[in-house]
Amino acid sequence: MGHRVARSMLGFLQGFAYGLFVTCLPWCLIGLANPRLAVPTERPSRWQVFFRYGLLVPFVSVLLWLTSLWGGFGPSLAGWLAGLAAIAVALPLERRWHRWRARRHRLRLEARLEAEAARRHAEREREAREAGVAVLDTARPPADADEVVLALCRAKQALLDARRPDLAIQADRLYSRYRHVLDVLATRFEQGELALERGRSLVTEVCLGAVDNLTAMAAQAGGVKGVDGDFVRRRLEREGARLSAVERSALERRLELLESTERRLERLAARNESALTLLDDAAVALARIETGRPRTSVAADQALSELRRFIGRAERYGRSDPR
């Protein structure tokens, strides 16, 4: 029984080697005409076709044939048919395996990029705290948040979703300036004064305009979020001579989209910087306003006068003490 099984296995192996060797030439010709049909890699070339079907597969088939000769058994029909279909069956499986590896690599790269972006964002937030900039928590806005603060939270989260923490930090800076100017207004004017309400409305309009810029930045950055500029540049540098005109034009168009988007983002960021400077100017100008109500100074002078009178009375009381 065991001898019969060994005969059938060796016969199958020898037939498989014959069938595999016969298919090398047709697949090589197909691959030379169109490498994508014969090589399952992402960027196949004719050199890969020649190596695969002119060297590797013939070597494997000859090795299998030599292995099956030691018993001296003839090839089987089942092995022959399996050898003929081996490459046609293996190519789709190998393509699926390559796609799975590419998807796994892409997921790892995205996770690494997200982790790096989160690290940079955390570092910027730490630097902002050290510089005295209030950091907005988009998941938990401040309890007294008004429409401007809530809009800043939404814009910041949109920029973080677009993987642009370097731009999201502008929302924190705007929030700090907004709160500071409102605090200065509250210290210089009384509640209900027309100047206070007018100043608040103007500051709100400036900040809402900056929020519109942040929202536009998030939309434009999200449009090119899936374009990997570094990958496109590396591919143009490494394979520039081998790329077809259509493929090269498509890659160059991606770079143009990235560059034009970056220029628009820079213009919007510059507008927000102007708004930040305007808020700083407003805070400084408001702090210099003399409202005509130096309540603290009057109270301090009055307290000093009362203290002097109290000391004088205390001294007279000590001199009149009979003891």
Image (cartoon, rainbow, N blue to C red):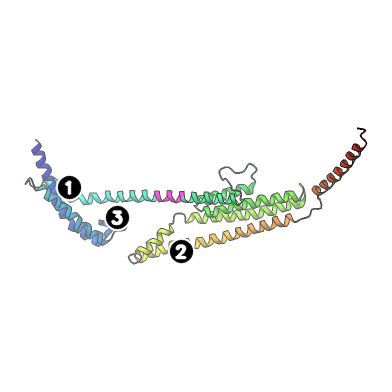
26 magenta-colored:
no
Determine the main secondary structure of the stretch shown in magenta: helix
Q: Residue furthest left?
A: 72
Label 2 belongs to which residue?
Answer: 256
Badge 1: few (under 14), some or many (20 or more) residues near its Cα, within 10 Å?
some
Question: How many numbered marks have been drawn onto this rendered protein structure?
Answer: 3
Q: Residue at x 66, y 58 (%)?
A: 278
From the top left corner, tell me how far across and down residue 295 is, in percent: 81, 48
Residue 269's quadrant in the figure? bottom right
From the top left corner, tell me how far across and down residue 10 is, in percent: 11, 44
Q: Nearer the viewer, residue 280 or 62?
A: 280
Label 1 belongs to which residue?
Answer: 82
Mark seen at residue 41: 3
**In the picture shown, does residue 95 fall above or below 233?**
above
Residue 218 shown left or right of residue 6 in the figure: right
From the top left corner, tell me how far across and down residue 251 is, in percent: 40, 62
Mark seen at residue 14: none
Which amino acid, by three-letter code, is at mark 2? Glu
Which amino acid, by three-letter code, is at mark 3? Thr
Distance CA(mark 1)–CA(mark 2): 51 Å
The magenta stretch spans which residues?
Answer: 108-115
Cβ–Cβ below 8 Å for labels 1 and 3? no
Quarter occupied by the C terminus: top right
From the top left corner, tell me how far across and down residue 199 is, in percent: 72, 53
Residue 10 shown left or right of residue 169 in the figure: left
Q: Residue at x 17, y 47 (%)?
A: 82
Q: Indicate the secondary structure of the residue bearing disc 3.
A: loop
